[in-house]
Image (cartoon, rainbow, N blue to C red):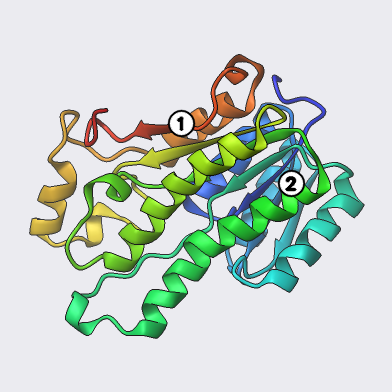
């Protein structure tokens, strides 16, 4: 129970990687709030969290400044001081550059990058110590055709992580996790074309990871043994990126 007595907020925490992180934080002893954009799966996730810990689910669009402020107000009223922020909320869009509409590009950047900025800013305005973990992607390093908006947003997350780590030290440690191919509703190998599946399997470990692989790293980064780690982007990716 290395996080006993601490409170955490996981954006996009109702399913996939966010759900796994929220459950792992709860198993480590933290009180956990999750936010979601109206996901019908949130009820089951909240039930599973409440078996483990004190938990809260909030419907919010992380790209909306007023909704982010209201979300932090609600968490504060329920848990008091928030000590852990996991910026996980994200959307994926695939489209050739010539067919990518400005409004679609802007929406991906708004959720994936602006959302992390807004939540991080609100977190810091309310406390001077704690942990922020941003969920990036190996594609933020590698790039990929037909995914200009998504890769730009995740590259931005990596750069923002380093800037925040410098600015907020020593009180707030800021790190990122760059997942590789993880089996979730958003990136299921069962729904991919043979060509896409071959790309995602072309790693030294030659398989998809599981959301729990990312969750384990998130718990570590929030725990006492990661007290000398900041400004890092840690790859949980089966070897797709080696730095």
Q: Which of the two residues, 10 or 51, is positioned nearer the viewer here?
A: 10
The residue under label 2 is 124
- Which label's residue is closer to the chain start, 2 or 1? 2
Q: Which of the two residues, 66 or 237, is positioned nearer the viewer here?
A: 66
Q: Is residue 233 above or below residue 135?
A: above
Quarter-of-image position of residue 79: top right
Q: CA distance from mark 2 to mark 1?
A: 19 Å
Q: List x then y, in percent, for residue 241.
A: 24, 35
Q: List x then y, in percent, for residue 124.
A: 74, 46
Quarter-of-image position of residue 58: bottom right
In what element is the residue under mark 1?
A: loop
**The label number, if any, that marks residue 62 in the structure image:** none
The residue sitting at 37% across, 41% down in the picture is 179
Check disc 1: other Cα within 10 Å, few if <14, some if 14-19, many if 20+: some
Quarter-of-image position of residue 221: top right
How many numbered marks does the figure carry? 2
Q: List x then y, in percent, for residue 203.
A: 16, 35
Check disc 2: other Cα within 10 Å, few if <14, some if 14-19, many if 20+: some
In which quadrant of the rendered image does the N terminus lie? top right
The residue under label 1 is 232
State if disc 1 and disc 2 touch (CB < 8 Å). no
The residue sitting at 58% across, 42% down in the picture is 164
Give the side of residue 131 with respect to residue 155, left or right: right
In which quadrant of the rendered image does the C terminus lie? top left
Q: List x then y, in percent, for residue 174.
A: 58, 36
Which residue occupies the extreme top position in the image? 225
The residue sitting at 43% across, 76% down in the picture is 106
Q: Is residue 40 above or below residue 29?
A: below
Which residue occupies the extreme front position in the image? 167
Q: Is residue 138 above or below residue 99?
A: above
In what element is the residue under mark 2?
A: helix
């Amino acid at each position: 129970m290395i996080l006993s007595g601490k409170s955490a907020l996981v954006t996009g925490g109702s399913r996939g990687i966010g759900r796994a992180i929220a459950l792992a934080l709860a198993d480590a002893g933290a009180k956990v709030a999750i936010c979601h954009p109206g996901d019908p799966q949130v009820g089951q996730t909240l039930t599973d969290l409440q078996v483990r810990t004190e938990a809260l689910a909030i419907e919010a669009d992380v790209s909306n400044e007023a909704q982010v402020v209201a979300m932090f107000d609600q968490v504060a009223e329920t848990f008091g001081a928030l000590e852990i922020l996991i910026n996980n909320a994200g959307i994926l869009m695939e489209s050739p550059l010539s067919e990518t509409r400005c409004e679609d590009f802007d929406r991906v950047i708004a959720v994936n990058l602006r959302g992390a900025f807004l939540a991080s800013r609100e977190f810091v305005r309310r406390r001077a110590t704690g942990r922020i973990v941003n969920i990036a992607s190996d594609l933020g390093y590698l790039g990929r055709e037909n995914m200009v908006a998504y890769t730009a947003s995740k590259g931005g997350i990596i750069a923002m992580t380093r800037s925040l780590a410098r600015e907020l030290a020593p009180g707030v440690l800021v790190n990122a996790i760059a997942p590789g191919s993880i089996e979730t509703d958003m990136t299921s190998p069962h729904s991919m074309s043979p060509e896409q599946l071959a790309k995602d399997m072309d790693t030294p470990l030659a398989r998809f990871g599981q959301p729990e692989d990312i969750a384990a790293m998130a718990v570590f980064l929030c725990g006492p043994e990661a007290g000398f780690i900041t400004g890092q982007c840690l790859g949980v990716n089966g070897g797709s990126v080696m730095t």
